[in-house]
Amino acid sequence: MAISLKEIAGAFMVLFAILDITGSIPIIIDLKHKTGNVPALKVTLISWIMLAIIYFVGDSILALFGVSVESFAVAGSIVILAIGFEMIFDITIFKYDSGPSDMTSFVPLVFPLIVGAGSFTTMLSLKAEYSAGNIMIALALNMLVIFVVLRYIDKIEKILGPGLLYVFRKFFGIILLAIAVKLFTSNLDYLLG
């Protein structure tokens, strides 16, 4: 396996755009307010492990359960839709206190925001372009970015301020609704056809 900076950079940029942790900052801050904390290390490690597993055995896992990537995308779109509704209408759909206290942000932060249909299909499609070692290095670098954002979310919140965060929250809620609708409709045709 040859380490290629060009491949690492290419895979890093693709994953950075798909994982979009910076675009998820308003959602993370909202989760922190609802759950009391976002365990940066645990969320990062679980996301990293899940994405690595998806890379190596994702096709087999879906086949084992008889689930297609499109079905996975539709399921993820429903969760994303619920998050968007929470952000726009200031309602609570997810019961954050029903699970173990250190895992309350697992859904929706790990799934579907970090490990969702987009990252699932991207991890599988990167196999055709780059070597496994370079993809794993790019994934590790992205996980480092995710950890830093999650770890310093309090400082990011202070920098942005409550007014800007409110606007971002509503704006990203609408974006999430649009993403959910696109994911749902573009994959539903495949499932029904």
Image: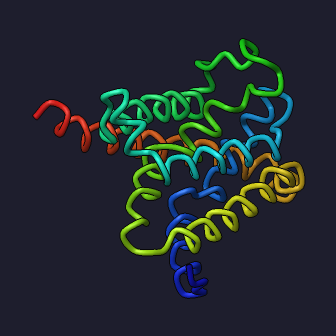
Q: Position of residue 190 (x, y in %)?
A: 18, 39
Identify which residue is drawn at 17% across, 38% down: 189
The structure's colour scheme is: rainbow
Q: Is residue 83 placed above or below 169 in the rendered structure?
A: above
Identify the image quadrant of residue 107.
top right
Q: Is residue 154 placed above or below 4 in the rendered structure?
A: above
Q: Position of residue 111 (x, y in %)?
A: 57, 37
- Of 158 and 16, nearer the camera is 16
- Of 18 and 182, nearer the camera is 18
- Of 177 and 192, nearer the camera is 192
Residue 151 located left or right of residue 171: right
Q: Residue furthest front?
A: 1
Q: Position of residue 80 (x, y in %)?
A: 49, 35
Q: Position of residue 119 (x, y in %)?
A: 49, 52
Identify which residue is drawn at 88% across, 49% down: 154
Q: Is residue 12 placed above or below 18 in the rendered structure?
A: below
Q: Residue furthest left?
A: 193
* Image mark count: 0
**The N terminus appears in which quarter of the rendering?**
bottom right
Identify which residue is drawn at 26% across, 40% down: 187
Identify the image quadrant of residue 61.
top left
**The C terminus appears in which quarter of the rendering?**
top left
Identify which residue is drawn at 63% across, 50% down: 24
